[in-house]
Amino acid sequence: MVRESKYVSKEKKNLVAWLKRKESESEVEVMVSSIKKVGVQPLTFQPWKSIAYDLAYISYVLGAKGCLAVYNKEAEGWGLLNAALHVRYCREKILGSFPKEEGLRPDINDLSLLASDGIALGNPHFIHLAMPRLLAAIDDPTLVKGALRPWKHDVFPNFLIRLYALYVRDQREFNSPNLGSLSDYQYVLDAWEDPDPAKMAAALNRICDYHVKRTGASAAVRQEFRYNPHADFPTEIIAIYRVREHLKLPTPEISHDLVSTPLFHPPVPLPPFQLDILDYVNDQYTQQFGEPLLPPPL
């Protein structure tokens, strides 16, 4: 029997504490009740925005429960994670249905996480929803002027657009002055075609360290991986392996704590899930917009 690592033990305690502190069950019930009380069709932007933000919290709880279940080798774990990621997908699709609403800016970090989920898990629906909006956001005037300039402050999206370009063999140069630093991710790009596997291994270890550092709560620094499932489920690291495999490039195995857990080895595709509140919102959305909110199953 393989002994549980100190890292996994610590993460399990953190997940249990977070779920208990947040009183997640009762709060999710409040969110579900709130969604069902929004009103009759057709809904304006503000009620849909409220639904989208309630869905975000539900996804955090499902993500935390899913990660904990996978750590505990419980059968429901991957289904919970699939539900959490689809809730996030639906949130982004709802917000993307109102592109001209004043004050609504695309969240480039959430879109980047959705795209990395899609690459890591072989889900083209996630990619096709996220990437056009993410690439268009490079020159979005609401994101490149004034105090709120996420391309300058958020590191991960600056890497994700380049990883996606490698994935689809897009030769474009991302030299817009609106973009910001790649930080530790630059080492991955520098080692991308280097024949020495030690350089890619070192780069991967660096970005694993970066991921772990960016999972805490901080008012001063944007934490790209603060919330679950992404705090424990490193889809951006898995996505690098998937892209390199797609391009027939070898990728060295590393032994970093972040990738030495069951969460680094998801089944593809993830198992199906059933979530009543998502079915309810899907029906509401379909009535108003004439197309399903949920993507078709893989």
Image: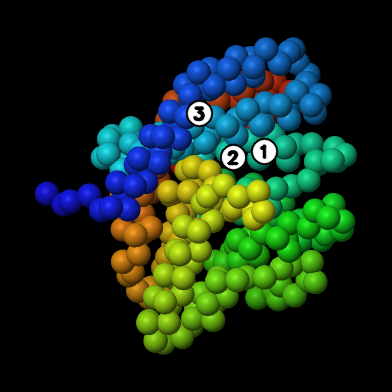
Seen in the picture, residue 22 relative to 30 is either above or below; the reply is below
Give coordinates of residue 268: x percent, y percent.
Answer: 38, 49
Residue at the spot 28% in from the left edge and 34% down from the top edge: 75
Q: Secondary structure at mark 1?
A: helix
Give coordinates of residue 154: x percent, y percent.
Answer: 66, 59
Seen in the picture, residue 180 relative to 113 is either above or below; the reply is below
266 sits to left or right of 82? left
- Amino acid residing under circle 2: Tyr
Seen in the picture, residue 251 relative to 261 is either above or below; the reply is below
> If you read the primary sequence from the N terminus, does the residue marked by circle 1 or circle 3 appear first?
3
**Residue 157, quarter of picture:** bottom right
Residue at the spot 44% in from the left edge and 63% down from the top edge: 208
Q: Nearer the viewer, mark 1 or mark 3?
A: 3
Q: CA distance from mark 3 to mark 2?
A: 23 Å
Mark 2 and 1 residues: CB-CB less than 8 Å, in contact?
yes
- Amino acid residing under circle 3: Lys
Q: Residue furthest left?
A: 1
Q: Secondary structure at mark 2?
A: helix
> If you read the primary sequence from the N terminus, does the residue marked by circle 3 or circle 2 appear first?
3
**Mark 3 — residue?**
22
Res. 93 mark:
1
- Amino acid residing under circle 1: Lys
